[in-house]
Amino acid sequence: MYVCLCNAYRSDEIREVAREGAETVDEAYLMLGDALCCRRCEATAQALINEERAATEEGGPASSRASGAGATHGERTQAYPDARQ
Ligand code: FES
């Protein structure tokens, strides 16, 4: 799932840099190559980072335990939850 439309960052990419040590969205995006732009994705991206870091500390990436579908399906987090209202 795309989380950041400005930079075309997907949730699996954000999870990967979280596992590699990114603790904030700024750190994660710099590791991926481009900084935050409009910041609409920031809360969603931070939630993914927090989830992945917590899961990694508990013994494995959250994405590998998400209903066998990796990071693309079954996620409860949406990039723009207010866009549907
Ligand atoms: S959607 Fe991520 S910075 Fe704009």
Image: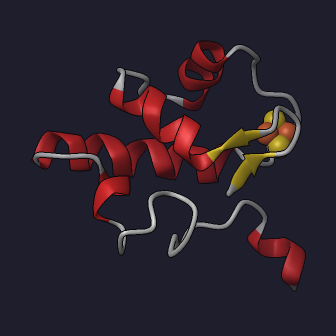
* Quadrant where the image shows the N terminus: bottom right
Q: x, y (%) of residue 63?
A: 38, 55
Image color mode: secondary structure
Q: Please identify the residue farthest to the front as the structure is shown.
A: 68
Residue at (45%, 33%) from the top-left corner? 16
Residue at (54%, 18%) from the top-left corner? 27
Q: Please identify the residue farthest to the bottom as the structure is shown.
A: 85
Query: In the rendered view, would you say 70 is above or below 15?
Result: below
Residue 67 vs residue 59: left or right?
right
* Quadrant where the image shows the C terminus: bottom right
Residue at (77%, 27%) from the top-left corner? 36
Nearer-the-camera pick, 76 or 12: 12
Nearer-the-camera pick, 53 or 16: 16
Residue 35 vs residue 60: left or right?
right
Q: Please identify the residue farthest to the left as the structure is shown.
A: 59
Q: x, y (%) of residue 45?
A: 59, 45
Ligand 1 occupies quarter: top right
Residue 49 vs residue 68: left or right?
right
Q: x, y (%) of residue 81?
A: 75, 72
Q: x, y (%) of residue 30?
A: 64, 14
Q: How many marks?
A: 0
Query: In the rendered view, would you say 55 is above or below 78?
Result: above
